[in-house]
Amino acid sequence: MKVIVVGSSHGGYEAVRGIISEAPDTEIQWYEKGDFISFLSCGMQLYLEGVVKNVNDVRYETAGHARSQGVSVFVRQEVTALDPGEHTVTVHNLDDDSTRSEHYDKLVLSVGAVPAPLPVPGADLANVYAMRGRDWAIRLKAKTVDPTVQNVAVIGAGYIGVEAAEVFAKAGKHVTLIDVLPRALQLYLDEEFTDTLTQTMREHGIYPAMGQGVKQFTGTDGQVSGVETDAGTYPADLVIISAGIKPATNWLKGVVDLDTRGLIDVDAHQQTSVPDVYAVGDATLVPFAPTDGMARIALATVARRQGRTAAKNILGQPMTMPAVSGASALSVFDYHFASTGLKEGTADQFGVKTQSIFVTDTVRPQFVPDAAGNAKVAFKLTYDPATKRVLGAQIMSTRDVTANINAISLAVQGKMTLDDLAYADFFFQPGFDRPWNIINVATQAALLGKT
Ligand code: FAD
């Protein structure tokens, strides 16, 4: 069997690994249009802040290692067309500009997404950047130490924008974080959490310009010098746009079924509308456990699970993509937060009625001093008021208590209720936790009708 995998990021990597680990004799051709395979944008902040020194280390896999496992790796080769009837793809070699046709028995598309451009005047000025992939990582790194860059404007206050803002604030730049939404990280956390994080960003030199739409970028000599919004004007020697992504699926229009946003329709086995063609990652929708529907969740965790699902099905081992709840975590200066599933701020867009309980506590018993690891923790649990089914949660502390959110993800996936969690058995040792874990505390309070 000959399998062609398009795209070398999380989804493509997992599909290749999933196949090769179980069926090492499979003929695999792995295509990447960039000049580097398997760069992890997830690790970009660690590189930009100098924790990881070499940009080439921010990856899962090397071409040499994959080749040693029998995989044919092609970089700077773009797959530009698909002929389902013939079971072929067209490959464009970007080095010598040649094209050729390659036959497949099974095809996996993990073409992902590209940063969505901002359709405003000045977006083509020099020093208007994005934050995704190795090339941008290298260019951004140079700007962190460029003395001519004093003012940085980040457009989009989701987790990528907040990562960018933190990187440049730590590099000593004046940072303005701009978003059309009223709160930073609004799609990840409710107000109880974002208020604290916004305050901490302010204290670290990031100016949050929230609730403002960008009207244009202004420039001098072809180079960006400022951002004009509908509420103000901000100086900027560098602009980083992190205002969403769009799927890299133009070339698939009219060949595989796409939705209006260009996302590839897949079934529970990651199969597209075309026989023997699978799709995974940011260019697809995913089953969303809290609503039992589909959702757009652009996370590496999702791409990896979809990649494995596609691999299993290609190998004739029927596997259904498990529903996910979109768990994610991030540090913002001294704070660590994580969230999963529905929040009050996002429930409406799914048409789901929710209720929430918000509690604060200390991570460890009160006699444990802060210097020994104690700190406040804030936790919010969201549930269905009619059935008491757990639908999501958010947690934040200056201590790393984010793993609690994985327990909530399991609860969401397993359709557990407040009653299931109220007295659930979690470990206690004063060096780690309290006898009633924050999940017990919150669910017990919710059952008493508190909010
Ligand atoms: P992509 O990562 O979009 O990669 C697609 C690849 O396919 C690219 O290399 C592209 O060049 C190649 N390609 C596309 N079309 C073709 C073609 N026609 N021919 C050949 N090659 C092609 N997720 C997390 O879970 N945790 C995190 O901490 C996290 N942090 C992130 C931080 C940043 C800054 C960013 C940008 C993203 C982060 N993500 C994180 C999200 C995660 O990176 C994405 O969900 C994931 O990369 C999606 O993988 P993918 O395989 O769908 O495609």
Image (spheres, grey):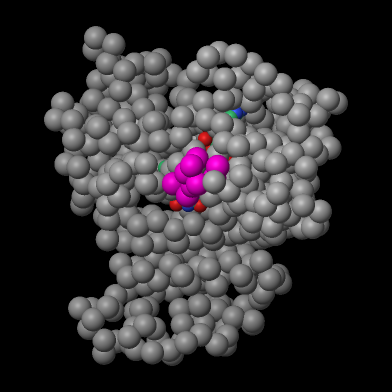
Q: Is residue 401 found left or right of 107 in the rendered image?
A: left
- Residue 151, image quadrant: top left
Figure check: 451 above or below 233: below
**Residue 166 appearing in the image:** no
Figure check: 52 above or below 231: below
- Residue 169, image quadrant: top left
The residue under the point 20% across, 78% down is: 371
Q: Which of 384 and 220 is in front in this view?
A: 220
Start-end of magenta stretch: 59-67
Residue 402 x, y percent position in the rendering: 43, 67
Most distant residue in the left direction: 147
The residue under the point 52% across, 30% down is: 75
Q: Is residue 120 found left or right of 91 in the rendered image?
A: left
Quadrant location of the N terminus in the rendered image: top right
The residue under the point 53% across, 19% down is: 94
Residue 317 x, y percent position in the rendering: 79, 57
Residue 360 x, y percent position in the rendering: 39, 74
